[in-house]
Image (cartoon, rainbow, N blue to C red):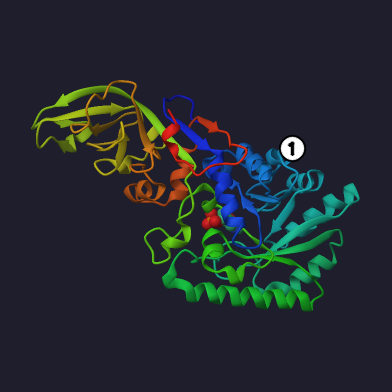
Amino acid sequence: MTIDYNLLRVTVDLGAIQDNFRLLRSLGSALIAVVKSDAYGHGLLPVARSLEACGAESFAVGTMAEAVRLRPAVRGEIFALLGPQSAHDAEIAINENITSVVSRLDQLPLLQQAANRRGNLVPVALKYDTGMARLGFNETDTDRVMETLAKCPRVIPQWLFSHLATADDPDQADYVRDQATRFQHIHDRLVAAGLQPRCSLVNSAGMLAYPELAWDRQRPGIALYGANPFHDSTLEGLGTGLRPAMHVQAPVLAVHPLPKGASISYGRAYVADQDRIVAVVAAGYADNYARGLSNKGWVVVNGQRAKILGRVCMQLTAVDVTHIPDVTPDDKVDLLGGCAAVAVTPEELAAWWGTIPYEVFCLLGMNPREYIPALPSSTQGDQCHVR
Ligand SMILES: *Cc1c(COP(=O)(O)O)cnc(C)c1O
């Protein structure tokens, strides 16, 4: 589902993702690399292969369909976070050796029946809700979970998972501790019932801020892709070593004067307060470059910041290049990333956009992508070498 009608290009630096992985792994327990949603828009297979090449042993995707795509590319354990949703999904889990994350009782007999047909065992992770209130069992469901497992002897509960709601917010540390306490109780109760699950609680922010909650596996997603979960908070320093991997560029299509008093684009939302020069860039909301950036966002043109003027259109966006000499058609404009000093950071773009880096990556990542392969031993560079 790549956007195939445009001029915008995404470049993914696989070395940056490897560096982020090495940095995170140096902090704590073993990692489950979260590569759901096409590796947050960076590309499931290239990202997973690069991570495995530098030591990743397990991966988490969302759906069973993603797990099927990933299976031939890596040897490691694959978790399907949404678990089997049908008998077909359960067959896949067994045939492709996928660990299902199970959050409803009815998923257990689905897996049992599929395992019966194949005559083998199937591992699962039991997902408990400790405060997110989305998916998962509650502690009080444990008796029913154990009864159902007793009827599904081919289903092996190897893992206990839960997910934190506020790990990125230093002001909500109490809520993290409440979730951690509930997780501990659930663990103890499962152990008392005779299980010996390996445990995983924390995401990127959780692993950086709460190393004491590492348990057996930590599950970083966003930090692998180089966004700092603590941007603009008192804990910002915890994520400073991370390096964004996504670089997004689009070409200039036209450069022309905009005289004082003239307006530009739909609705005349910008009227020139002085004589200006504008560059019209081949990017718009049809490329998932959000219309909310109108009159708000900035890009980088020839190494300098340029502000968006007027409305972002379907495939075009105008920017102010009055202060930038020699801008010509086909110059490449950085919408995200670029050379270190002026690079548009994921956090900045997200703030102008009114969202978070996660959404910026997932949406811009749907555009055609190119890859910078990881060097054998990746260096701490920036994106200046990219065209
Ligand atoms: C997406 C996801 C993660 C990764 O979260 P980040 O905030 O991106 O690190 C971890 N665990 C689960 C269950 C998830 O769905």
Q: Is mark 1 within 8 Å of ligand 1?
A: no
Question: Which residue is at a point 48% across and 30% down the rendered structure image?
Answer: 3
Question: Which residue is at a point 50% across and 74% down the rendered structure image?
Answer: 175
The quarter in which the C terminus is drawn is top left
* Position of 315 relative to 198 (above/below): above
> In the image, 328: left or right of 205?
left
Q: Residue 42 sits in which quadrant?
A: top right
Q: Nearer the viewer, residue 281 or 46?
A: 46
Q: Residue 74 sits in which quadrant?
A: top right
Tell me if mark 1 has few (under 14), some (14-19) or many (20+) residues whose alpha carbon lies within 10 angstroms of its own.
few
- The x and y percentages for residue 33 are 63, 51
Q: Nearer the viewer, residue 64 or 336?
A: 336
* Position of 127 relative to 355 (above/below): below
Question: Which residue is at a point 52% across and 41% down the rendered structure image?
Answer: 41
Q: Nearer the viewer, residue 84 or 169?
A: 169
| Residue assigned mark 1 | 72
Q: Quadrant of ligand 1?
A: bottom right
